[in-house]
Amino acid sequence: MNRALEERVAERTKELIRINKDLENFVYTASHDLKTPIINIEGLMRALQETLVENDVKLEEADAILNMIATSINRFRDTLTDLTEVAKLQYQEEDNQAIVSFEEILGDVTSNIKCMIHDAEAEIIQDFSLAPGVAYSRKNLRSIIYNLVSNAIKYKSPDRKPVINICSYPVDDYVVLSVQDNGLGLREQDHDKVFSMFTRLHDHTEGTGVGMSIVKRIVENSDGKIELSSELGKGSTFKIYIKYSNQF
């Protein structure tokens, strides 16, 4: 009976793996195949707008509709981009790891989102003295820091200027990258939802709800872990645990 049960479990596991692989294949193929029609639609939208301008057609209602269509296209494109990123994590081989500096990656990220930082009047405080960097995929580490920092600004509290504390330090077998903010925070029952695909807990900001799911998958794919502590109205702290053997 035990042998029969083990065989049934093994068969079921094999079937679930196959189904999951088929789903990932579908997501990967669909996200790529849909990019071309989206690009074509964007081109047609631009052509229509240029035609209206050239013919001096002034239709306020049409402008409002065109803007809504453009917004929908952008959201669709962003969703496809995130889906492609998720699918790629299943297929790509591990990137060649190199010694990367937390300070350097953060500088690259903040340069990329400097308008967001300026508009929010955000203050970013960093301290990487205890663990200046890791042997890690540069692209993946940038994706992690980009998502954590940009989210900390996006979900800022309307009652205070956003302050983001970023630091790194060794703990047991890991080097920890900590990103702490004083933003909106989350209810305890919503903590796990942060890492769910297409889940958005605040509707006042743009986004697809995929970013933190990507971060979690990147971290776990490299034998790390991610922790979240948050309190509604006070802010959140994300801690990324990277294997200590990767520290330099």
Image (tube, grey):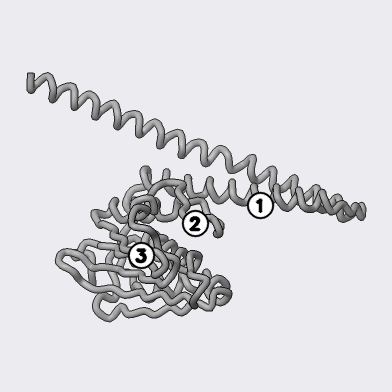
The mark lying in front, picked from 2 and 3, is: 3
Location of the N terminus by quadrant is top left
Asked if marks 2 and 1 touch (Cβ < 8 Å), the reply is no
160 with respect to 119 (left or right)? left
The mark lying in front, picked from 2 and 1, is: 2
Q: Front-most of 182 and 218?
A: 182
Q: Secondary structure at mark 1?
A: helix
Residue 243 lies, with reference to residue 122, above or below; the image says above
Asked if marks 1 and 3 touch (Cβ < 8 Å), the reply is no
Name the amino acid type tagged 2.
Answer: His
Location of the C terminus by quadrant is bottom left
Residue 169 in the image, given as x and y percentages of width and height = 24, 73
| Mark toward the start of the polypeptide (1 vs 3) | 1
- Report which residue position mark 1 lands on: 71
Name the amino acid type tagged 3.
Answer: Glu
Residue density around tag 3, few if under 14, some if 14–19, many if 20 or more, within 10 Å: some
- Report which residue position mark 2 lands on: 202
| Mark toward the start of the polypeptide (2 vs 1) | 1
Residue 216 in the image, given as x and y percentages of width and height = 34, 53
